[in-house]
Image: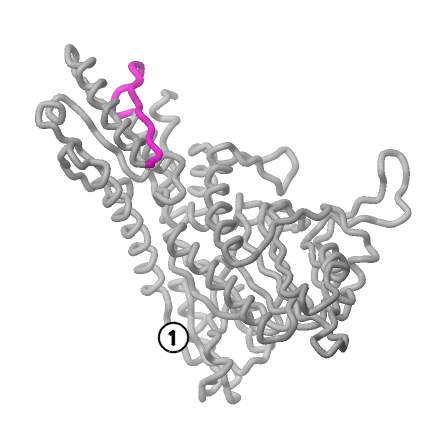
């Protein structure tokens, strides 16, 4: 098989989304499968994309008073058991360490499935007075959840990378404001960095984080009609404060229990972005994240090589001086067609083509990755124009994802319509809901769809309708969908 044939994607995104995604991830040098089932190896290109998401979030966190820390990956079993809901919620997925070398440990250590149980005791130590609050911590780390489901890189792996924020506050009002702030920051990153429009709401009570009062969520729709839980922000109430003795003395010198929050975004966000924007030619990366925002490809025919390459070098230098991430591809051993295909596979948002005509006319030709649309620009002022075109590429990606979302939110008012709509179209189905988990089970048993979100505003302004499943009074709208 030739290099050109090996380079291309052979599966169809529309018809075989899962197979297409697996091929895309490997051929675009994003990740490989590890020898242990359920784990992946993240290649430098994939990790660079994750670093871009990290940078976007980390700067937002730090601008709002968050400090990064790091806690051990091992959690003593006694610590985990201090919050019974954590144990019950994660017990089937916890990986345990029982030996250190040849010695059996006196107490089992859990490989963190989440870190509330190891962070909360130290928050208790560091909190004495109301003057110590709010306390805002975050850590970037990996966690391990020994799930039995099939591996899908970035969507579902036994070990995954994420950030987890943990905060303590004087009262519910302050903690709830923190919960909403982090939810808003996640929504902003999805829109401005990943070019994905999210749905924002809360999880139904039976699907909230173990021990939480309320779990809020960012949901985003994939091209195959499944929903991805993109990030969550939890108001934990005082349950963790009580379990781990996170208390403080108020202004009247009386002891109070702190209200806490936790919030996290994993590399599932990366998987969502790759699946949503990619196509049958390869990755399609938002300019915000792309390791190379622009690739400059000189195209020469024979005697003009030196002149064309020199001109291309000058263009690349101008773009780099403007702060853009630029790659000059002047390889002799590859023809322009191969280069175009390779950089399309890698998802570079903008290609700049330079041939003898561009040199003669003092211009450049730019081509958008999402749709191949081309434009001729004057060399003078090209850097500013290229930045505008990168913004246009982002808008194209966002608009396409937004159109997909808008076309795939449908309404239903009975069980048959919910099942039939999801079965035929996928996407989200909005239906009045009484709040009883049993009504969700009716849908889940028939078609493996679940309630992924309930609008937040309905907590204050409930709807007046009948549940689409049981016909009892309903105060909420449930969004049903199949999920990753």
Taking the image as shown, residue 377 lies to the left or right of residue 70, namely left
Query: What residue sits right under mark 1 in the picture?
Result: 411
Q: Which residue is drawn at 46% across and 32% down?
A: 29
Element on which disc 1 rests:
strand
* Viewer-closest of 152 and 313: 313
Whether residue 336 appears in magenta in the rendering, the answer is yes
Taking the image as shown, residue 278 lies to the left or right of residue 113, namely left
Whether residue 155 appears in magenta in the rendering, the answer is no
Residue 318 sits in quarter: top left
- The location of residue 437, given as percent across then percent down, is 60, 76
- Is residue 317 placed above or below 88 in the rendered structure? above
Residue 300 visible here: yes
Most common SS among magenta residues: loop
* Viewer-closest of 380 and 308: 380
* Viewer-closest of 91 and 320: 320
Q: Which residue is drawn at 68% across and 69% down?
A: 130
Pointer 1: residues within 10 angstroms few (<14), some, or many (20+)?
some
Residue 446 visible here: no
* Viewer-closest of 129 and 289: 129
Q: Which stretch did the figure color magenta?
A: 323-338
Residue 263 sits in quarter: bottom right
């Amino acid at each position: 098989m030739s290099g050109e044939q090996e380079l291309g994607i052979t599966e169809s995104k529309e018809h075989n989304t899962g197979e297409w995604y697996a091929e895309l991830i490997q051929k675009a040098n994003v990740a490989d499968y590890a020898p242990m089932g359920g784990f992946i190896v993240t290649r430098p290109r994939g990790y660079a994309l994750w670093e871009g998401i990290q940078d976007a979030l980390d700067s937002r966190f730090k601008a709002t008073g968050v400090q990064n820390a790091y806690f051990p990956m091992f959690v003593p079993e006694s610590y985990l058991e201090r919050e019974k809901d954590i144990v019950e919620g994660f017990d089937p997925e916890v990986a345990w360490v029982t030996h250190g070398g040849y010695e059996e440990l006196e107490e089992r250590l859990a490989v963190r499935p989440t870190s509330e149980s190891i962070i909360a005791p130290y928050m208790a130590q560091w909190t004495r007075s109301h003057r110590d609050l709010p306390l805002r911590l975050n850590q970037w780390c990996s966690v391990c959840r020994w799930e039995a489901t099939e591996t899908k890189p970035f969507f579902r792996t036994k070990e995954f990378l994420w950030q987890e924020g943990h905060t303590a506050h004087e009262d519910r009002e302050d903690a709830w404001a923190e919960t909403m702030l982090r939810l808003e920051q996640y929504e902003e990153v999805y829109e401005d960095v990943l070019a994905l429009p999210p749905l924002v709401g809360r999880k139904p009570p039976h699907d909230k984080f173990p021990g939480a009062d309320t779990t809020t969520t960012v949901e985003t729709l994939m091209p195959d009609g499944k929903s991805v839980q993109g990030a969550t922000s939890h108001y934990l109430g005082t349950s963790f404060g009580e379990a781990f003795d996170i208390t403080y003395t108020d202004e009247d010198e009386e002891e109070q229990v702190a209200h806490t929050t936790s919030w996290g975004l994993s590399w599932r966000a990366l998987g969502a972005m790759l699946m949503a924007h990619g196509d049958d030619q390869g990755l399609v990366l938002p300019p915000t994240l792309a390791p190379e925002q622009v690739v400059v490809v000189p195209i020469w025919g024979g005697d003009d090589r030196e002149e064309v390459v020199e001109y291309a070098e000058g263009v690349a230098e101008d773009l780099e001086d403007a702060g853009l991430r630029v790659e000059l591809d002047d390889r002799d051993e590859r023809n322009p067609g191969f280069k175009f295909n390779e950089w399309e596979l890698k998802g570079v948002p903008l290609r700049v083509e330079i041939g003898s005509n561009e040199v003669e006319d003092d211009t450049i030709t730019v081509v958008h990755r999402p749709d191949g649309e081309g434009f001729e620009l004057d060399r003078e002022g090209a850097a500013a124009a290229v930045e505008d075109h990168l913004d246009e590429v982002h808008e194209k990606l966002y608009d396409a994802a937004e159109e997909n979302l808008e076309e795939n939110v449908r309404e239903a008012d009975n069980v048959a319509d919910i099942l039939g709509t999801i079965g035929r179209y996928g996407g989200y189905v909005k239906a009045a809901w009484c709040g009883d988990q049993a009504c969700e089970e009716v849908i889940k048993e028939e078609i493996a769809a679940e309630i992924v979100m309930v609008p937040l505003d309905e907590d204050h302004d409930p709807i007046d309708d009948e549940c689409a499943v049981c016909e009892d009074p309903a105060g909420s709208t449930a969004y049903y969908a199949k999920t990753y």
